Image (cartoon, rainbow, N blue to C red):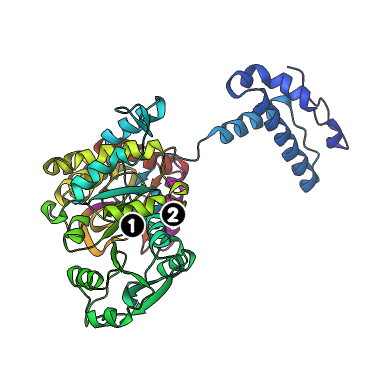
Amino acid sequence: MKSATNQQSENPMAKLPSVDYLIQQSAQRFQSTYGLSELTKVVRLVLQEVRQTLLSEASTRTYKDEDYLQCIEQKLTQRAEKKVKAVLNLTGTVLHTNLGRAVLPKEAVDALTLAASEACILEYDLGEGKRGDRDQLIEELLCELTGAQAATVVNNNAAAVFLLLHALSEKKETIISRGELIEIGGSFRIPDIMKRAGVKLVEVGTTNRTHAKDFMEAITPKTAMIMKVHTSNYAVQGFTAHVEDDVLAQIANDHQIAYVVDLGSGNLVDMSLFGLPKEPTPMEALKSGAHLVTFSGDKLLGGPQCGMIVGSKELIAKIKKNPLKRMLRVSKLTLAALEAVLHLYRNPARLPEKLTVLGQLTRTRENISLQTARIVSHLNPYFEGTNLTISSQVVMSQIGSGSLPIDLLPSSAVVISGKSKSAEKMVLRFEKLLRKAAIPVIGRIKEQQLILDLRCLRENQEEILSMSIQKVFQEIHFKP
């Protein structure tokens, strides 16, 4: 192959090859895979970077053809790498917002794949042979599982709350306990959402105590609803008081206004049946008299990201007529996955086996400890004679995503720690390199220890974790 620069020059910039020349030299190797357009773009980028390097370093370095080809290949590969990639969630938080929350069960993945790869029923009524309503795909199931008269779905629970407020309380008042004016991730605040929805917020009670009379005294001719927000991402303990659903529902009925409940996370079964802390359900809220309930699909429910509104047929109809409903509607992929997950709830006895999230939440410490012991035993030889140690440790996992904030789950973790102060930097480097693995490993640092909680690690992922740790050792020059 002819060299792009055969000799050094006082001005290396003058000897830079042309874009056409580098395309000709690299086309046979890369064009069929990446296409001419992408190859041309990358060649220009590489030449631009070389120019900047030569200028910044005032260098007389000579680049050969093979140097350029290596740079082109590296950048093509880098640009082709997908940003959405699988990771090992070893943080100890099952429903990790930053890591995609609920992992979907196989049934949902299969349904999603079918909807993505084929034409499918979305807004078509097979019986009538005409346009239908996409909510019909899941409304019957949601009503069956919650006891609601009607249901609708939007793209997340924040959207459900916003749509409900905008449709039923715009330019009117909504009463809420001061202790329920929550803020969740991304600075989502109930007062801000109400303001954006055109609703006047009326706070009653105090942070820790609110009584029925506080609500009754706040009702005016402009009041549209009473709203209760489940404080799923924090807990107020001690000298507290709150008003039960049935009492608030009766107050609302007496004054002919709506009573709505935002459960946030939400779930469709009594979690205590599976040894987990109990959370309020939509069924319980509706039975207690709530007219509408909102909750998420991608948290405890274990489905895709969406927000559901269930309850009164009359109020749901008003909500669906709101122009914002179309803006916030979900895609066929979400509906397909959600329908598959809801079908699993028809057989609650098999939920821990079928629903991925519930399976992760109900794993016993004994089961996780056996997995931890296997991995530590396999990797221990790599740590002998080094400044680092590997061990198993009892830890506590959390559910996450604003669900049961003070309830923890007993678990077991692989822990990498340093034997000295200087070794603590190695632990931090170890954690960083695991994040850069082919399949990134995401743990957590606590007290200069790298903690890899195995609650969410499947058995077929054990080898991936072991290989990733071994490769990190190679990179930082540790030898078994």
| Mark number displayed over residue 92 | none
- On screen, residue 238 versus residue 183, left or right, reads left
Q: Can residue 395 be seen in this view?
A: yes
Query: Which residues, given as a range, are shown in magenta?
Result: 412-437
Q: How far apart are marks 1 and 2 (CA)?
A: 31 Å
Residue type (three-letter) at the residue carrying disc 1: Ser
Residue 1 position by quadrant: top right
Residue 213 versus residue 228: which sits nearer the camera? 213
Residue type (three-letter) at the residue carrying disc 2: Met
Location of residue 59 in the rendering, given as x and y in whole percent from the top left corner: 79, 42
Residue 109 vs 298, above or below: the answer is: above
Q: What element carries label 1?
A: loop
Residue 22 versus residue 109: which sits nearer the camera? 109
Q: Name the residue under label 2.
A: 426
Residue 272 versus residue 191: which sits nearer the camera? 191
Residue at 81% x, 31% y is 16
Q: Earlier in the sequence, mark 1 or mark 2?
A: 1
Q: Is mark 2 on a helix, strand or loop?
A: helix
> Dot 2 surroundings within 10 Å: few (below 14), some, or many (20 or more)?
some
Q: Is residue 431 magenta?
A: yes
> Dot 1 surroundings within 10 Å: few (below 14), some, or many (20 or more)?
many
Residue at 61% x, 31% y is 76
Location of residue 178 in the rendering, given as x and y in whole percent from the top left corner: 34, 77
Q: Which of marks 1 and 2 is in front?
A: 1
Q: Is residue 231 visible?
A: no
Q: Mark 1 points at which residue?
A: 401
Residue 129 vs 255, above or below: the answer is: above
Asked if the residue at tag 2 contacts the one at tag 1, i.e. Cβ–Cβ closer than 8 Å, the answer is no
Residue 462 position by quadrant: top left
Location of residue 277 in the rendering, given as x and y in whole percent from the top left corner: 17, 60
For the C terminus, give its image quadrant. top left
Location of residue 221 in the rendering, given as x and y in whole percent from the top left corner: 36, 76
